[in-house]
Image (cartoon, rainbow, N blue to C red):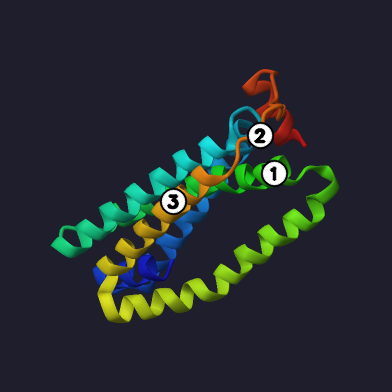
Amino acid sequence: IIAQGWLALQLTGSPFWVGVAAGARGVGILCSGALGGTIADRVDRRKLLISVQLVGMTIAFTMSFLAATGLVRIWHLLIMAWVQGASLGFIMPARNSLVYDLVGRENLLSGMAANYWGMNLMRVIGPSAGGIILAKAGVSGCYLFMGASYGVGILALTLVPRRDGVKTHQGSLWQDLREGLRF
């Protein structure tokens, strides 16, 4: 988020485009959240998270390359911000469901607390680290670090044990999506 805002400002010189880039990310989340939750109920959450993390890693490395070569344009940033946001619409419900799969109902409160503790810790550490990396390695280095971080996340997910017997929903995708939106 720090690199995205800084890059938008560098490319345009306008705070307006910083807001548009942040808005593109938010619209991506809004557009995919219900579908992401519906799909997370139907598939192996670990595989879904790995797939979406691969998308994030590809975006980060692409942005690093574009920034390093000077080829990046504001439209690249806006599209990548939207795709990053859309991927979050899949990551959040899949991660929450995976916590349930791993700890079960009896430990769900502790599992969710640990999950949110870790996410909030990263919300504190991430921007500070992003600012330091941005100052030392530039926008390209920041995106490169982000891509590598996705790689570490993918590796960690491959180590998560697969739980047999986890029930996934078997109804119609569109019916469940409508039901979720109605709820």
Residue 100 versus residue 162 in the image, above or below: below
Residue annotated with mark 1:
102
Quarter containing the N terminus: bottom left
Q: Earlier in the sequence, mark 2 or mark 3?
A: 3
Give x and y (percent) for residue 79. 35, 49
Q: Secondary structure at mark 2?
A: loop
Q: Earlier in the sequence, mark 1 or mark 2?
A: 1
Q: Residue at x 64, y 44 (%)?
A: 93
Q: Residue at x 68, y 26 (%)?
A: 168
Residue annotated with mark 3:
84
Residue 162 versus residue 132 in the image, above or below: above
Labels 1, 3: front one = 1
| Residue nearest the observer in this picture, 24 or 98 | 98
**Residue 79: in sight, yes or no?**
no
Residue annotated with mark 2:
163
Residue 162 versus residue 130 in the image, above or below: above
Q: Residue at x 57, y 44 (%)?
A: 160
